Image (cartoon, grey):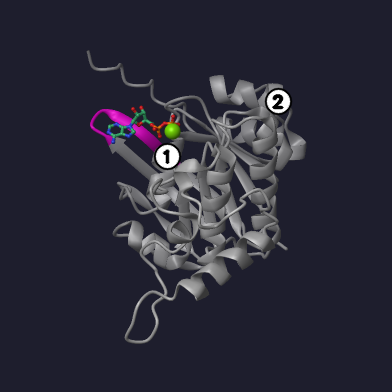
Amino acid sequence: MVTEQPLLRIEHLSKSFGAVQALRDVSLDVPAGRVTALAGDNGAGKSVLIKCIAGSYPPDSGRLIWDGHPVFLRGPKDAAALGIETVYQDLALCDNLDVVQNLFLGREKVRRHGPLDEEAMELAARDTLRNLSVTSIRSIRQRVGALSGGQRQAVAIAKSVLWNSRLVIMDEPTAALGVVQTRVVLDLLRKLADRGIAVIVISHNMNDVFAVADRIAVLHLGQLVAVRPIEELSRQLIVELMTSGYSEGSGSDAAAAHRSTPAPAPAPAPAR
Ligand SMILES: Nc1ncnc2c1ncn2[C@@H]1O[C@H](COP(=O)(O)OP(=O)(O)O)[C@@H](O)[C@H]1O
Ligand SMILES: [Mg+2]
């Protein structure tokens, strides 16, 4: 279900690194219960945008409205406290630890005055994986380093469910996966959204975008050039928007948004 008020509202976010303006006045609503795909060519500003949402980069200007309230994130911990979980490409899992240890890393359950409550953690781990229909992981006491790419993604996603995340951000989750594993991960993302979690997924892969996204936001040279329900865009139009920031056939919004904004300043020449 989508409520009137978006879970996250990004307002007029800008961020520069020296002469490179990575984000220019980006405004985007992120609703609960929906998968929002974030697309854009290399260097478009996708990672910088999610790092601003995840508390890793402070924006130069603009603000984030969470659940109707302006928030200022001093770091990733502030974002985590709100329920924002980011799964980066390297996944931040520890290969030498098993599945349960990874799921509870830094948030271990302990018995009163005593050792870790392994039983409770195993139970919660098993429950969470079962709820997500993750059946391919044979033993939750297996080291994560021994799992396949898809299984590792499943563990990362289970972690966000276990910790009651409200917004899950995935940066290219299927980049290194085969066809079957990709399907499993996309199904998991769908399940997160069906539970009312807001999902942002960065992807270059149009098959993935069309398989899982409800809506798509396209960045071009740091500017948001389109935000549309997925039904309203074709692959070709998305690629056009990604490469030129403009598309003749993309209908009102994108074209109008483009017209109503002043012509973007030319991209700064790369430093030599
Ligand atoms: N920490 C940084 N320092 C300097 N420039 C950066 C930094 N992070 C990103 N950039 C620049 O910002 C722009 C957007 O980068 P990024 O968000 O990583 O693009 P992508 O859409 O490929 O994820 C690029 O020009 C990149 O070089
Ligand atoms: Mg990136």
In terms of depth relative to the viewer, which is nearer, 78 or 40?
A: 78
Ligand 1 is found in the corner quadrant, namely top left
Q: Position of residue 136 (x, y in %)?
A: 66, 48
Q: Is residue 221 left or right of residue 256?
A: left
Q: Residue at x 37, y 21 (%)?
A: 267
Q: Residue at x 51, y 68 (%)?
A: 68
Q: Residue furthest right?
A: 231
In terms of depth relative to the viewer, which is nearer, 268 or 169?
A: 169
Q: Is residue 48 above or below residue 86?
A: above
In three-dimensional space, the C-alpha distance between marks 2 and 1, rounded to whole angstroms, equals: 28 Å
Residue 218 is one of the magenta-drawn residues: no
Among numbered discs 2 and 1, the one appearing first in the sequence: 1
Q: Residue at x 39, y 68 (%)?
A: 107
Label 1 secondary element: loop
Q: Is mark 2 within 8 Å of ligand 1?
A: no
Q: Position of residue 21 (x, y in %)?
A: 33, 32
Q: Which residue is mark 2?
A: 235
Q: Which residue is mark 1?
A: 90
Which stretch is magenta? Answer: 17-25
Q: Are marks 2 and 1 in contact (CB under 8 Å)?
A: no
Q: Residue furthest top?
A: 272
